[in-house]
Amino acid sequence: MSAPSPWAHVAQAAAALAAGMGVGRFVYTPILPLMHAQAGLSAGAGAHLATANYVGYLIGAVAGILLPALVRSRAVLRCSLLLLTATLAAMPLTHSTAVWGLLRLVAGVASALVFVVAAGSLLHHLREHPPHLSGWAFGGVGGGIALSGLLVLVLRSVADWRTAWWASAALAALLTAGSWNLWPEAVVPAAAPASGATAARTHRWFGALFVSYTLEGVGYIVAGTFLVSAIGQGSPGWVGSGAWVLVGLAAVPSAALWARLGRRWSRPGLLFAALVVQAVGIGLPALIGTPAAALVSAVLFGATFIGVSTIALATGAHLRFPRSVALLTAGYSVGQILGPLAVAPLLHHGYHQALLLAALVVLAAAAAAAVLRIGFPHHMVVVRHTAPQQQRESAENTRSAEAGPDTLAPHSAN
């Protein structure tokens, strides 16, 4: 059986990411206001359900790190997609907050495994192709957000929260079918180890990057969870759901566009700019309670949250820091767990204070990115112990497979 064409691979991976992340993980955001109004879910309990999902995501991400065979398994991808769909369909079958929490925990594990398999597949099979191809595939997350948001927007006036969950499960099932034959990552020969001196020279920049990306995890997830509810407090109900659709639509091309910009401008500078724009987007609906401000907020947030991830992972891989992708993902996941817990005490007064705090945290992430820019080694020269040419080539292939979109493309230091 021959490998699919690059664009067919992009479409399959995008469908997997749309199901696993855009629907399975983020459909909770537009359904949350319906559960508040119709299922008696309190704001605090809503935050706890979000945290359960993010704990599950961390478990799944760590499993992918500790058991690399999971990343290369088509069976893991298929089982995770089916399990995720089942958790969505089971949400309306109970009113127990504890059961909801368990379902969202399992959904988090499944969505993380879907992500690591799909991302590994993309970065391995498309590494010889233009980086914007992987960017379009990662835009599948935005496509899933837009589709599920549009679904809830249509259903909110004719059905209840149960129907919204069941319809989301049906959408996830369709996307699962579209990604069923996705080729996982193949086994890659082990890389030749970099010298200790090289790692030591980059650790201070990686430290700033790690702090920035972890803070981004804290701030972005607050908006990713509560943005629709916050907008709905001061606007007609359709505005919140409509804003979430805009988040998804803006996210679809964002990774590809940021990847292209990364070929012309320095990644630390792009990371700083993206974080500042995102902070403005998160804080805007808390400061200006108009529908127009809500829609602008949605576009700014959607255009940056996937882009920040691709830039940060690409920067870590550029620094050649050992297991950079794994470490950054772990920090980001911990930040996502802390975010809803940090703002839970503020939710008794509505969502605006939570958004303002999230915007400040993202600005702190931007400050760390500004530190990253100081003396950043834009043109890395890695010195290795003497090794056969074949081993050196294997190391290059491994780094390409681990890197994010446009990770190793040359660019000027602007």
Image (cartoon, helix red, strand yellow):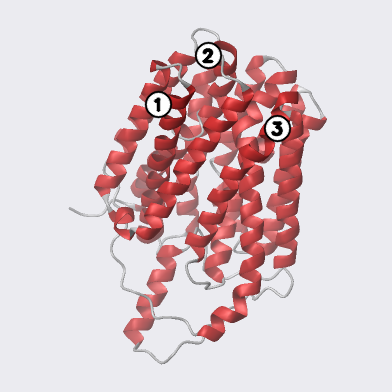
Q: Name the residue tied to disc 1.
A: 88
Tell me which corner region of the image, top left, top right, bottom left or bottom right, holds residue 340. top right
- The residue type indicated by label 2 comes to Ala
Q: Is residue 345 visible?
A: yes
- Between residue 403 and residue 258, name the one nearer to us: 403
Q: Residue 60, percent across and down? A: 41, 47
Q: Residue 345 has which mark? A: 3
The earlier-in-sequence mark between 1 and 2 is 2
| Vertical side of 298 occupied by 203: above or below | below
**Circles 1 and 2 in contact, beta carbons < 8 Å:** no
Residue at point 53%, 22% (across, down)? 31
Q: Name the residue tied to disc 2.
A: 39
Residue at point 37%, 89% (across, down)? 387
Q: Is residue 257 visible?
A: no
The earlier-in-sequence mark between 2 and 3 is 2
- The residue type indicated by label 1 comes to Leu
- Between residue 198 and residue 308, name the one nearer to us: 198
Q: Residue 197, percent across and down? A: 55, 86
Q: For the C terminus, give its image quadrant.
A: bottom right
Residue at point 74%, 66% (across, down)? 371
Of circles 2 and 3, the one toward us is: 3
229 vs 140, left or right, is right
Of circles 1 and 2, the one toward us is: 2
- The residue type indicated by label 3 comes to Pro
Measure the C-alpha gap from mark 2 to mark 3: 21 Å
Q: Secondary structure at mark 2?
A: loop
Q: Residue 178, percent across and down? A: 32, 36
Q: Residue furthest bottom?
A: 386
Label 1, residues with CA under 10 Å away: few <14, some 14-19, many ≥20: many
279 vs 307, left or right, is right
